[in-house]
Image (cartoon, rainbow, N blue to C red):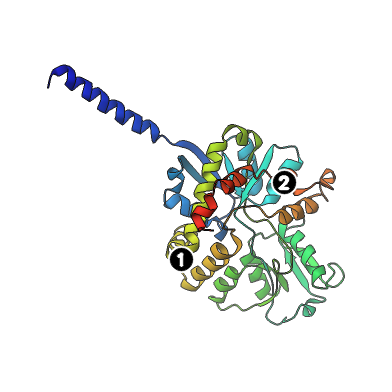
Amino acid sequence: MTLKITLLLVALLLGSRAGQTQEKKLDSFTISYASVSGTRAPLWIAKDLNLFEKYGLDENLIYIASGVTSVNALLGGSVDIIAASGSSAVGAAARGAPIVIVASLGHIAYKLIAHPSITTVQGLKGKIIGSSRIGAGTDFALQRLLPKLGLTPGKDVQLIPTGISESDRRMVMLVQGKIDATLGTEDNLLQLAGRGMKFSVLADLYDAGVYTTGSDIATSRQLLKQRPRQLKAFIMAVTEGIAIGRTNKELTARVYRKYMKIDDAKLLESMHKNYLLGSIPARPFPKEEAIQNDIEDLSFSYSHLKGRKAGEFLDLSLLKSLEDEGFFKKLYGK
């Protein structure tokens, strides 16, 4: 083989490798989530299984412990997409921020939980029900729920802000006799039962038709215009994480152990059932009724939100594109 041919082959080989390296180049993409809760499982699964890389993203998954702070980070360009309550995005958009909701990881599976001595809804009459803060999601949710149960806040029951956002800590207040009822989750019940605490479950918000936002996916309208491919790749990675989590209970348990420091088998079983098979949608479309509730609730603070519709704060073009391309059908076989 002549030297000229040898050099040509080497050049072709190096060129081929350079091309492969270029093809494998990933797009940097920063994602934040506003709470360490069961709804975040698809993000953690996608990260641990390298699903973001599969779809061309070099992800940076970070925890920012506040919806408002997450929104500010998004507007400042520090993050590309946020997973937080839809009310955070709607509230920011109401103030003129160019934020839009593009997908969802579902609602918070709240239940109305009372002291064990109270076994019926009517038993709440004359009692104290604790929310987190005035104007917070739990406050609005209770104000929607109680009339559906035949109770009028301020008349039949006293609705007070506890200043505590963590539902398990509010439930401890029940045991201490500081309040008589609050909103909590099935996971809270199992965790606190392990410590010998007992409670009464009086209602399920979702079953009662009270829809809340929990973990909606939002980005800026500018980014949606400039980086639709990367945003679409993010949704694909997360949706595949949902699909895998739904069918692989052991993997989901491993993820919850790692990120939530939970090791109770019953609790892990419950979380898989309540989140991956429950509140997290298989196809991550936002629930418009929940967004509409947020709009109506926030309109008490932002009068210009009165009469606005959920569709104004949503852009489902990426999800609809994936649906048209058969992505969800390929994942779930239907």
Q: Is residue 193 left or right of residue 4?
A: right
Image quadrant where one finds the N terminus? top left
Q: Residue at x 47, y 63 (%)?
A: 247
Pick the residue in front: 301 or 39. 39
Q: Quadrant of residue 124?
A: bottom right
For disc 1, the neighbor class at 10 Å (few under 14, some 14 to 19, many from 20) is some
Image quadrant where one finds the C terminus? bottom right
Callout 2: SS = helix
Which callout, 2 or 1, points at the residue further toward the start of the chain? 2
Q: Is residue 174 above or below residue 37?
A: below
Q: Residue furthest right?
A: 155
For disc 2, the neighbor class at 10 Å (few under 14, some 14 to 19, many from 20) is many
Residue 303, position as x, y percentages in the image = 85, 45
Q: Quick check: can you spot residue 320? A: yes
Name the residue carrying label 1.
Answer: 249
Amino acid type, mark 1 = Lys
Name the residue carrying label 2.
Answer: 90
Q: Quick check: can you spot residue 91? A: no
Residue 46, position as x, y percentages in the image = 47, 51
Q: Is residue 144 left or right of residue 217?
A: right
Q: Is residue 238 above or below residue 274?
A: above
Q: Quadrant of residue 315?
A: top right
